[in-house]
Every structure is written in structure tokens, then in C-alpha cells.
Image: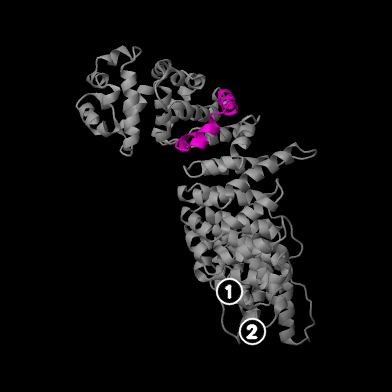
């Protein structure tokens, strides 16, 4: 180990000596210091000796260059071993290498390239990427090369690769500085300049660097607005071959940007959603390119204000086409591997269906037919998403006659009857869909005693569990549910007296009281909670220990005609004078 450390020091001294003479004798630091090699075994390395490669009679300048080249070759060999990289970084070799690059960038490409390649090797040590990038002057040198090196040059390729590595995992802090220093803008310039070689390694590395920088969430809004950033990525997407590496990396970069909610609507306005639709219609059903495009559209569709624009622009129709293609690919001879993209496309339809303005269009383009096919899938995740679509269409389409008519078909009723009894999220979502479809009409027996409403009794325990988790800010089945939607479903299901008894038995009453105590409960949810509590107060199965409570008596004397939404505040005022909120 000691011989290894001395050998590296000897190699560094060659660099120091050359730099001193090249600078006209200027003094330079770079003492070895107290750096110690790591405790892990580095093994034997036979290359570590400076062998005489030139005759003493040779020109001194030529001899120094030859020694420098030999030292760089040996350091390059060392840096190729991941065990040695940490040692070299600890000894601050990166500062010496950068000094060589700074001096030779315009004089000797061979030496400059050799030093840059060693820096590239050092940048592969993810735990030390921040240390390497903090080397004084590194950003300035990179900027100079990225902006001035001719397309296709080795220096340009090495510099872009260095930026990519330093911005990768472990280089989180570097990403912000790269953006602020102009390195990101210089990388954009490289991609545009390498237009003739769009499939080459330089462009791939440059795009990967942009993707890395875009993974830093606080920088995403600024990146979206960086001059040339989006135009360059969109140009790459338009001009790249289907399923090519540049196409995928550009899509992943945009996907990273779409993770920030401030970017989503603006990305639609920029025309990115339209471009993604084209990608979804040309990519293979099992491709990563399709996955990236779909995930981006899913991110956009999370925003309520984006859904109508996406559907009107054809996103829903494209998602349905993707689902059909994935189904066909999965069932074809030798097919397979498209299940993940099918699930993502189905989630996109689910998000898009959560809007009053989108249901008719989605059903018109085949969303309901596709959803029913997916509802019978053996994959529980696919079933759960399909049930979620039916729930959204029923909830948000209640005012659309055509939507309600389509949902009340026998085919939908059969699937809901099957889904309600399934465990997990599928049964929960299906019970919500049935409640919204068949529980929100007049009180005639044919509605309250509809078989689907009666079947919802089996899901009341899951509705209560979901409400409990949501009130506590916790996820259930991987999501945090909407309190308003859960309360509405309980209200409709509990219009049936048999279901009321089950709801009381599974502990639903205290949960409704907790809903009333929430500061952010809206007026409409207050009303439906009060109406449900009114019905429960009249039920003989109400626990005996609270039957005589004053708040129960208040709700009992309130007939349905006195439980109007505009009387919510007066009822609450009465309840506050009782022990209601201490239940």
C-alpha cells in the first residue's frame, strides 16, 4: 500500500514538473499531504514505476512531454480500476489533471484528451462526484470546450461524458451549479450543433446530462423556461428514429420536467402533449419509449385544469388506442411485455375520467368498452384501475344523460357485481361506482333495494377503513382517498336500512363525527354527513349507550324536509351545544 501511494505521488510530480516549466517556472503546490489509501485491498499493480522512455540526450522539452504522456497513461490505467479511484480523488489528482487540460486545451489535443479521460474515469465514482465537480476552474474549462470544440471532436465527447457522469447519481448538488454556471445551456448548444450525428454517443451523453439535471425538482420550472431547452428536446423527438436511444432519453427528460406541477399546463400549451400523442401511436406496445410518453401524460392528467385540454386534444383517444394495441400484443403468438404500458395507459384514462367535461368524449371513443374488458383481467392492479374509471364516470357524469345511460347498462352492472366482492381497491372503487349510479335518486324501493346497492354492504368495512386512513393522512392500497367522495358513497349506500346496520357495526359512526370536526370539510360534505347521521340516529341498531344523547335527539326530530343543505350551519350550531364532537 505504501509503495502504491509513493508511485502515485511520483506520477503526480511528473505533472507538477511539466506544469512548472510550461508556466515559465511558476511555483505550484500539490504536496502529497497526509492522504492515506483506503483500507480495502487494492491488490498488486505492476505498472507503477516510471521507466526511462527517452534518452538523456533528447531535447529537454520533448523529454518532459514524453514523461507527461507516460504518466498520464499510467494514471489512466489506475483510474480504470474502481478500487483506485477513491484514492486518486483523495490525493486531489483531479486538480492536477484540470491544470493540464487548462494549459493544453488549445495546444496539444492528445495530452488534453488523455487528462480529460482520466477525469471521466474519476467521475464514475458516484460518492465523490460532488468533490470532483468542486475542483476550482472545472466548470470554466468545460464551458470553454463545450462552446468551442468542433462537432465530432474527441475533446467534446470526453467533456460531454464528464458532464453526464458528474450530474448522475451522487451529483445532486452539481445539477444546480451546472444550471447556474451555464453548463446546461452549453450542452443544449452541443446537441443542436451535432444535428448531423443525432444518433451518436455525444448527443446521447448530452441528452443524458439534461435528463440528470431535470431530475432535480426545484430546478424544473426554470429548466422548462431555459432558452432552447424545450425546442431542442422537441426537435430530437421529431427527428429521431422510432425506439432510438436519443428519442427515449429526450422523453425521459421531459418526463422529469412534468413531475413538477408548475410545468404541466405550460407543457400542454407548448404543444408537448400533441407531440406525445404521435409517439404513442408509433412506438411498440412494449417499448420504454411508449412508457416514458405515457408517464408524462399521466403526470399532466393529475392536474384538474389539464384534463379537458388533454381530452379535447386527443389524449383520451390515443390512450384507448394504446390499450387496444397492448391487449393485442399480449395475446399474440410470442407476444408479451406490454402489460406495464397497458396499466399506465389505463391510469391515464382513469385520471382523464375525473372531470365533468370528459366523460362523454371518453365513452364515445370506446373508454367504457375497454374498461369493461380490463375489469375482467386476472391482474388485480388492472381490475382496480378499471373499477376506478367506472367510479369516476359515475361520479362526474351524473349530470350527463348519455353517460348515465351508458353506465346503467346490463354489462356494466354485471362487472360491478363481480368487482364489488373483490378484495382491495377494486371492490372499494366498484362499490363507490354502484353507490353513485343507483343511490342518488328518489327513495322508491326499486332504487334503494337495487341489488348493487345491497351488494355494497360487503364493501362498507373497506369504505370505513379508507375513510379512517384518509382522515389520518395515510395511504390505503397505495393512495390517499378523497374524503368527499367517500362520504358521498356512504351516504348513498346507507339510504338502505340494512346497509345502515352494517355501517354501524363496522364502526362508521365515529368516523362521520370526525369528518364534521375537520377544518377543511366543505359545506356539501357537511350536508351529506349530517343526512347520513340523521338516518343512523333513527336506526334501532344505534348503540344503546348513545341512543339517549342530546345530539341524537336533535337529529331524530329533524325530518328529511328539515335537513336541507341551506340549514347545515343551524344544525351544526345545535350540535355544538351537545356532546356530539366528543363522540
Residue at image location 72% in from the left, 69% down from the top: 197
Question: What's the distance in space between the residues labelled 1 and 2, CA to CA?
Answer: 23 Å
Q: Which of the two residues, 517 or 348, is positioned nearer the viewer here?
A: 348
Q: How would you rate the neighbour count of disc 1 (Cα within 10 Å): few for under 14, some for 14-19, many for 20 or more?
A: many
Which corner quadrant of the image does residue 196 belong to?
bottom right
> Residue 64 location in percent, x, y?
71, 81
Residue 282 screen position, x and y as percent: 70, 53
Q: Main secondary structure of the magenta part?
A: helix
Q: Secondary structure at mark 2?
A: helix
Q: Residue at x 47, y 48 (%)?
A: 303
- Left or right, residue 153 beside residue 217: right
* Residue 512 position (above or below residue 121): above
Can residue 582 be seen here? The reply is no
Q: Nearer the viewer, mark 1 or mark 2?
A: 1
Q: Which residue is mark 1?
A: 143
Mark sitting on residue 470: none
Residue 524: x and y, percent?
34, 35
- In the displayed structure, 544 sits above or below 137; it is above
Question: In this orientation, does residue 442 appear?
Answer: yes
Question: Can residue 501 be found in the magenta stretch?
Answer: no
Report the quarter where the C terminus lies. top left
The earlier-in-sequence mark between 1 and 2 is 2
The residue tagged 2 is 22
**Secondary structure of residue under mark 1:** helix
Give the class, few, some or many, for how many residues have Cα within 10 Å of label 2's Cα (few <14, many ≥20).
Answer: some
Tell me where residue 519 sits by quadrant.
Answer: top left
Region in magenta: 394-418
Furthest toward the left, the residue is 577
Task: State the residue in front, 37 or 228.
Answer: 228
Amino acid at each position: 500500500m505504501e509503495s502504491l501511494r509513493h508511485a502515485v505521488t511520483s506520477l503526480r510530480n511528473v505533472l507538477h514538473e511539466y506544469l512548472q516549466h510550461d508556466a515559465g517556472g511558476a511555483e505550484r503546490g500539490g504536496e502529497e499531504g497526509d492522504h492515506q489509501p483506503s483500507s480495502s485491498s487494492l491488490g498488486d499493480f505492476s505498472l507503477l514505476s516510471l521507466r526511462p522512455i527517452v534518452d538523456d540526450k533528447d531535447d529537454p522539452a520533448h523529454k518532459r512531454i514524453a514523461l507527461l504522456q507516460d504518466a498520464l497513461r499510467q494514471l489512466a490505467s489506475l483510474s480504470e480500476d474502481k478500487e483506485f479511484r477513491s484514492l486518486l480523488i483523495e490525493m486531489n489528482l483531479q486538480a492536477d489533471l484540470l491544470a493540464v487540460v487548462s494549459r493544453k486545451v488549445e495546444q496539444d489535443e492528445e495530452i488534453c484528451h488523455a487528462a480529460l479521460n482520466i477525469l471521466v474515469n474519476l467521475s464514475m465514482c458516484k460518492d465523490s462526484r460532488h468533490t470532483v465537480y468542486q475542483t476550482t476552474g472545472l466548470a470554466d474549462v468545460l464551458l470553454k470546450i463545450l462552446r468551442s470544440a468542433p462537432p465530432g471532436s474527441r475533446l467534446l465527447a470526453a467533456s460531454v461524458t464528464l458532464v453526464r457522469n458528474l450530474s448522475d447519481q451522487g451529483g445532486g448538488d452539481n445539477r444546480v451549479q451546472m444550471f447556474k454556471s451555464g453548463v446546461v445551456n452549453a450542452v443544449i448548444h452541443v446537441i443542436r450543433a451535432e444535428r448531423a450525428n443525432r444518433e451518436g454517443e455525444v448527443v446521447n451523453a448530452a441528452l443524458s446530462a439534461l435528463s440528470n439535471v431535470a431530475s432535480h425538482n426545484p430546478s424544473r420550472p426554470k429548466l422548462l423556461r431555459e432558452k432552447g431547452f424545450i425546442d431542442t428536446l422537441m426537435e430530437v423527438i421529431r427527428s429521431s428514429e422510432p425506439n432510438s436511444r436519443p428519442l427515449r432519453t429526450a422523453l425521459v427528460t421531459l418526463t422529469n420536467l412534468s413531475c413538477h406541477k408548475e410545468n404541466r399546463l405550460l407543457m400542454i400549451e407548448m404543444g408537448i402533449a400533441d407531440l406525445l400523442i404521435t409517439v404513442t401511436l408509433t412506438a411498440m406496445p412494449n417499448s420504454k419509449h411508449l412508457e416514458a410518453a405515457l408517464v408524462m401524460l399521466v403526470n399532466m392528467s393529475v392536474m384538474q385544469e389539464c384534463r379537458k385540454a388533454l381530452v379535447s386534444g386527443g389524449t383520451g383517444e390515443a390512450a384507448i388506442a394504446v390499450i387496444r394495441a397492448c391487449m393485442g400484443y399480449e395475446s399474440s403468438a410470442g407476444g408479451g411485455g406490454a402489460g406495464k404500458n397497458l396499466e399506465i395507459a389505463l391510469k391515464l384514462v382513469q385520471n382523464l375520467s375525473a372531470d365533468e367535461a370528459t366523460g362523454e368524449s371518453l365513452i364515445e371513443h370506446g373508454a367504457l368498452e375497454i374498461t369493461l374488458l380490463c375489469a375482467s383481467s386476472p391482474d388485480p392492479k388492472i381490475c382496480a384501475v378499471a373499477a376506478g374509471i367506472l367510479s369516476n364516470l359515475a361520479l362526474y357524469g351524473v349530470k350527463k344523460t348519455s353517460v348515465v345511460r351508458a353506465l346503467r347498462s346490463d354489462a356494466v352492472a354485471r362487472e360491478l357485481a363481480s368487482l364489488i366482492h373483490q378484495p382491495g381497491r377494486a371492490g372499494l372503487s366498484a362499490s363507490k361506482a354502484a353507490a353513485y349510479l343507483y343511490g342518488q335518486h328518489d327513495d322508491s324501493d326499486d332504487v334503494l333495494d337495487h341489488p348493487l346497492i345491497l351488494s355494497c354492504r360487503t364493501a362498507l368495512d373497506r369504505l370505513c377503513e379508507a375513510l379512517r386512513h384518509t382522515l389520518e393522512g395515510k395511504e390505503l392500497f397505495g393512495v390517499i382517498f378523497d374524503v368527499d367522495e367517500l362520504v358521498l358513497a356512504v351516504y348513498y349506500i346507507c339510504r338502505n336500512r340494512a346497509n345502515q346496520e352494517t355501517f354501524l357495526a363496522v364502526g362508521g359512526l365515529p368516523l362521520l363525527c370526525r369528518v364534521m370536526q375537520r377544518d377543511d370539510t366543505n359545506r356539501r360534505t357537511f350536508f351529506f354527513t349530517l343526512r347520513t347521521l340523521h338516518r343512523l340516529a333513527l336506526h334501532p341498531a344505534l348503540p344503546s349507550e348513545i341512543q339517549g344523547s342530546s345530539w341524537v335527539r336533535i337529529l331524530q326530530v329533524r325530518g328529511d324536509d328539515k335537513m336541507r343543505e341551506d340549514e347545515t350551519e343551524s344544525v351544526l350550531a345545535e350540535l355544538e351545544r351537545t356532546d356530539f364532537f366528543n363522540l
